[in-house]
Amino acid sequence: MRASLIIPTFNHARFVGAAIDSALAQTVSAFEVIVVDDGSTDETPTVLARYAGRVRVLRQENRGLSAARNAGLAAAHGTFVSFLDADDVMAPTKLAAQLEVLERSHAIGWTYCDVLMETVATGATARASERFGYASRALDGWLFPELIHGNFIPAIAPLVRRTALEVVGGFDERLTALEDWDMWLRLSLIAEARYTPAVLVTYRIRPGGMSEDRARMDRNRFLVLDKINRTRPVALESLGNVGRRIIADTHNWLGKEAYASGDWREARRRFAASGVTVPWQREAPWLLSKSLLRAAAGR
C-alpha cells in the first residue's frame, strides 16, 4: 500500500461525500481511503454506507479531531499518510505529485503543497502562499525555525512518511486547536520537508469555524509552545534570543492566565521563569510582585 488518506468527520453529512469523491479520484494506484466517523449524530452513517467496499469506515464515540486522526493513523497500511478534513477537497493529482517527491528522495520525510483557502460566506479565495507570505519564508529543509513563529501549513497540505509519524507520535488529543501545528513542529525536528508550489487542495473556511475563536486559538498556541519548551528545550535554546523571547512570552501568557484564575503559586512560577529567561524585561518582575502581594493578602 503506497499511501493512506485519512478523513475524520463529525456531523458533516452535507460535505463528506465530496471529500471522499475527491479522494477516490486520485490518479495513483495502491492507496486506501480511511474515514473515521467521530460519533456523528446526523446522516453521516447513511452517506458513508454509499461507499461500502471503496473506503474503510471506522466508527468511535465522539473524542475530537485529534483522536479521530489518530484512529485513522493506527489503522493505516500505507507507506505515506495524508489527512483530509471532511469539508475540504483534494485535486486528483495530489497524491501523485507528492508521492513523486518522497519516493524520489528518501532523505525527505514530508512534503506539502500550496492550498486554495476559500471563505464560504463571501466566496473570497486566497492561496496559503499569499496569506502566509511564502515568498519571504524558508520553505524547504529543516523548518523548525520558521514554524515556531506560527503555523503556515494547513493540515490537509502534507504527505508524510508513516515512519516519521511513528517516531513523533500521533496528534495531541489534549489540544482543542492547533494540533496540526504541534505535529508539524515535532516533525520539523526529525525530518526535512520539501515544498511543492502546485495548489493541490481546497480548504473551506466556514462561519463558526475554530479559527474564529481567538481565545481558544491563543490559549492553544501557548500550550503548544510550552510543550515544546518542556519536551524539546534545546530546540528553542538553539534559536538564541528569539527562542528565549518565545519562552518568556509563553511563561508570561500562562502566568497571566493563572493570575486571573487566582492560582498565585502557578503565576509566581511562570513570572519567575520568564524573568530568569529574559532578565531585561519589565513585565515579568512587576507581575511577579503583584502575585506575591495577592498571595500574601489571601493568607
Image (tube, rainbow, N blue to C red):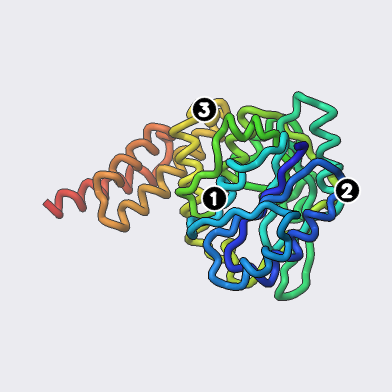
Q: Check the image and report above or below for 297 versus 238.
A: below
Which residue: 86% across, 53% down?
92
Quarter where residue 108 is shown: top right
Query: Can you give x and y, in whole percent of width and height, for residue 98 in the image?
Result: 81, 40
Residue flagged by tag 1: what amino acid is it?
A: Ser
Which residue: 56% across, 45% down?
70
Query: Can you give x and y, in whole percent of width and height, for residue 65 in the image?
Result: 55, 55
Which residue: 76% across, 65% down?
18
Query: Can you give x and y, in whole percent of width and height, for residue 135 in the image?
Result: 80, 45
Q: On residue 66, which mark appears?
A: 1
Q: Is residue 296 visible?
A: yes
Q: Disc 1 vs disc 2: Cβ atoms closer than 8 Å?
A: no
Residue to which mark 3 is pinned: 237
Which one is nearer the viewer's eye here, 204 or 245? 204
Q: What's the CA distance linking mark 1 and mark 2?
A: 28 Å
Pointer 1 or 2: first along the chain: 2
Q: What's the CA distance linking mark 3 and mark 1?
A: 28 Å
Q: What's the CA distance linking mark 2 and mark 3?
A: 44 Å
